[in-house]
Image (cartoon, rainbow, N blue to C red):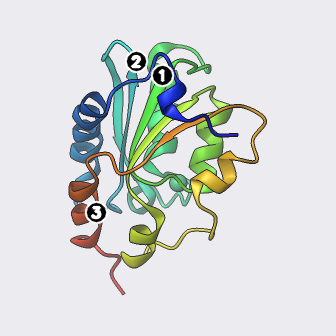
Amino acid sequence: MIRDHTLHLNAVDTQQLTRWMKSALAAGVQAGENPFGAAIFAVDGTQVVAANNTVNSTNNPAAHAEVNAIADASRSLGRSDLGGYWLLATAEPCPMCLSAAVIAGIRNIAFGANQVVVNEAGYGGLGICSRELANQFNCEIVLRGSILGNDCVRFLLNNRKPN
Ligand SMILES: [Zn+2]
């Protein structure tokens, strides 16, 4: 189920999300790693964490930026419930990451580049976009795409997966 953000009284505006996305994007730039970044913010603008994808350095296929950010935030806050926080991701979350976020209680998610760009950069997904998946959940999710979109798209396309 997806809630239209315009109906959300506590909606964070696009300017705010754009500022937050810059942190996620900065975290995503890590030599030798896949080009994905994520960050978690409190609604008051406090940054909890920013993380990058560490699949290559850890040989852990599940070490996506969002999963790393969720784990780091939970450790840092000393709790596993991240309800009320925003997850920012430079690219549209894959089904694993979207599910991990929702399981962690996160209901507000913003991303930059969409899945089409992720595929174009060589990082194939599972063929299901985040909105499709979110619609299947039994809770309401606020999903905002194209935040700092041009920068996030450029970042991915300039760091395509090597053949
Ligand atoms: Zn993922």
Question: Mark 2 and mark 1: span between their CA atoms?
Answer: 5 Å
Where is residue 28 drawn, in percent x and y?
28, 50
- Left/right placement of residue 135 relative to residue 155 reads right
- Left/right placement of residue 7 relative to residue 54 reads right
Determine if residue 30 is in view: no
Vertical side of 106 occupied by 23: above or below: below
Identify residue for label 2. 42
Graded by Cα atoms within 10 Å as few (under 14), some (14 to 19) or many (20 or more), the crowding at tag 3 reads some
**Which amino acid type is shown beneath numbered disc 2?**
Ala
Q: Is mark 1 within 8 Å of ligand 1?
A: no
Where is residue 83 drawn, in percent x and y?
58, 19
Identify residue for label 1. 85
**Which amino acid type is shown beneath numbered disc 3?**
Val
Please name whichever residue, 132 or 63, is drawn nearer the observer in this view of the structure: 132
Q: What quarter of the picture does the C terminus occupy?
A: bottom left
- Of callouts 3 and 2, the N-terminal one: 2
- Of callouts 2 and 1, the N-terminal one: 2
**Residue plotted at (68% across, 52% down):** 133
Q: What quarter of the picture does the N terminus occupy?
A: top right
Question: Mark 3 and mark 2: span between their CA atoms?
Answer: 25 Å
Vertical side of 87 occupied by 27: above or below: below
Please name whichever residue, 136 or 28, is drawn nearer the observer in this view of the structure: 136
Identify residue for label 3. 153
Graded by Cα atoms within 10 Å as few (under 14), some (14 to 19) or many (20 or more), the crowding at tag 1 reads many
Please identify the quarter of the rendering in which residue 117 is found: bottom left
Q: Is mark 3 within 8 Å of ligand 1?
A: no
**Residue plotted at (64% across, 64% down):** 128
- Left/right placement of residue 25 relative to residue 57 reads left
**Which amino acid type is shown beneath numbered disc 1?**
Tyr
Please name whichever residue, 123 or 151, is drawn nearer the observer in this view of the structure: 151
Q: Is mark 2 within 8 Å of ligand 1?
A: no
Q: Are marks 2 and 1 in contact (CB under 8 Å)?
A: yes
